């Protein structure tokens, strides 16, 4: 039996989600806000949390922080309403595993919950042989067979489990990014299924469309090439399809529901980049942040800066994710007993910069108020330990 905790302060939405997930094998537990949710977690053995973002007392973002800190094995899926994109973006950076627009609950809720649970349960046991391995490199040419996608994602999870220090939820998040990227290449790239057509393999019309495309020589000859390299410091993957490509300029943008897959990819991976044609995507996730090496941000993004107010030293935010801390190899290394080894990150997503705190230790403030995450705007003062920085973009 799988115990699902649904958290929402609106009775109508609670009843809707309960009804949609009322299926054999699921036990539904409900809560009206984050505080009630934390109480339910202590009373029940919760397998997955589905939470609204905008709630009184403790909102969804605060709940994500608490769950990641005290219950790190429980995945959290967000339900996002119009106007909550900023909070959702911060929650994904802070550790949430997926999101569903509230306008799409009827179509997406059950399948998203099952996808996350399936990915979470796969590759739970690592072969002891990999304990002796320092790394692995794989290269695949996938024929047009949708059943190969979960098998490849499962292999990635096994390698992540065997070779990296990532916990269960971080492995899930990387697996979701890989799954979304390969699905995009297979369905959107090679089969040219338009963005407005949702890919749901339980839906008869979707299955029929896929079968029609695969029956045509134009599509059946196309392949997806996947190569990934994993060691104890980083995971990188390159995915190339034979399709016509797409305009990647809006990839990772929240404005369109069809961008959900690329939003998850950009939220969960350290870097995501496309070739000019848009048929090749490269992603990387660094486990050992003491040796962070990520690619510069796109020239389309305006360069932002951190200026230390005491020394007037200017730090250029010229990478999509910068790690700040006291450990060697951090992009901005600070000497202070109030700064943790990996203290916080400053991340660029959808042309905005976000501050996400990685530790409960020390002091992190935005404009003199303690924060765990925040969107940065020009003129903001960020306090990290006993260092003050002015943000400009």
Image (tube, rainbow, N blue to C red):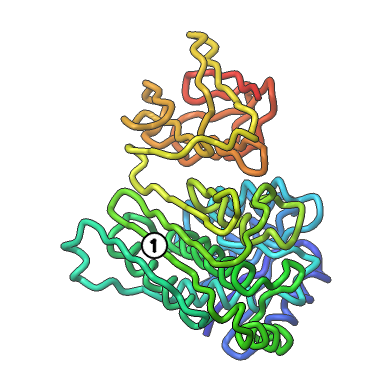
- Above or below residue 359? Residue 365 is above
State the SS at label 1: strand
- Residue sitting nearer the eye, 208 or 166: 208
The answer to whether one can see residue 65 in this image is no
Residue bearing mark 1: 227
Q: Residue at x 36, y 49 (%)?
A: 287
Residue 188, position as x, y percentages in the image = 64, 68
| Side of 254 relative to 237 (left or right) | right
Q: Residue at x 80, y 50 (%)?
A: 83
Residue 205, position as x, y percentages in the image = 74, 86
Residue 192, position as x, y percentages in the image = 67, 71
The mark tally for this picture is 1
For the C terminus, the image quarter is top right
- Residue sitting nearer the eye, 179 or 237: 237
Residue 162: image quadrant is bottom left
Extreme top residue here? Answer: 311
The answer to whether one can see residue 84 in this image is yes
| Side of 177 relative to 303 (left or right) | left
Residue 302, position as x, y percentages in the image = 64, 29
- Above or below residue 347? Residue 388 is above
Extreme front residue here? Answer: 217
Q: Residue at x 75, y 76 (%)?
A: 107
Q: Residue at x 47, y 19 (%)?
A: 386
Extreme left residue here? Answer: 132
Assess disc 1: are there few (<14), some (14-19) or many (≥20) residues with their C-alpha within 10 Å of its C-alpha.
some
Residue 258: image quadrant is bottom right
- Above or below residue 106? Residue 320 is above
- Above or below residue 104? Residue 255 is above
């Amino acid at each position: 039996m799988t115990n699902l905790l649904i958290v929402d302060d609106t009775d109508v939405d609670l009843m809707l989600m309960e009804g949609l997930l009322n299926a054999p094998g699921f036990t539904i537990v409900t809560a009206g806000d984050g505080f009630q949710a934390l109480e339910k977690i202590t009373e029940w053995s919760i397998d997955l949390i589905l939470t609204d973002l905008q709630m009184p007392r403790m909102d969804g973002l605060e709940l994500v922080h608490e769950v990641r800190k005290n219950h790190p094995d429980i995945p959290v899926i967000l339900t996002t309403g119009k106007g909550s994109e900023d909070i959702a973006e911060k929650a994904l950076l802070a550790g949430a595993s997926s999101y569903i627009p509230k306008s799409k609950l009827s179509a997406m809720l059950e399948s998203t919950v099952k996808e996350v649970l399936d990915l979470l349960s796969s590759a739970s046991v690592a072969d002891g042989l990999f304990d002796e391995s320092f790394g692995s490199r794989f290269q695949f040419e996938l024929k047009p067979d949708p059943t190969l996608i979960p098998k490849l994602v499962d292999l990635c999870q096994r390698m992540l489990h065997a070779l990296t220090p990532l916990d269960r939820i971080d492995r899930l998040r990387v697996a979701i990014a890989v799954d979304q990227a390969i699905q995009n290449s297979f369905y959107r790239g090679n089969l040219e299924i338009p963005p407005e057509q949702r890919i749901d393999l339980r839906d008869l019309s979707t299955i029929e469309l896929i079968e029609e495309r695969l029956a045509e020589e134009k599509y059946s000859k196309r392949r997806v090439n996947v190569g990934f390299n994993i060691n104890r410091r980083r995971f990188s993957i390159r995915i190339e399809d034979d399709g016509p490509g797409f305009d990647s300029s809006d990839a990772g943008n929240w404005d369109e529901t069809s961008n959900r897959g690329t939003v998850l990819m950009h939220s969960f991976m350290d870097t995501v980049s496309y070739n000019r044609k848009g048929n090749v995507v490269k992603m990387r996730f660094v486990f050992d942040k003491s040796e962070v090496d990520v690619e510069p941000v796109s020239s389309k993004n305006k360069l932002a800066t951190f200026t230390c107010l005491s020394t007037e030293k200017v730090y250029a935010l010229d990478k999509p994710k910068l790690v700040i801390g006291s450990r060697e190899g951090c992009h901005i290394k600070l000497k202070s007993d109030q700064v943790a080894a990996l203290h916080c990150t400053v991340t660029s997503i959808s042309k905005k910069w976000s501050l996400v705190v990685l530790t409960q230790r020390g002091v992190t403030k935005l404009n003199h108020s303690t924060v765990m995450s925040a969107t940065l705007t020009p003129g903001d003062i960020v306090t990290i330990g006993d260092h003050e920085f002015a943000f400009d973009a």
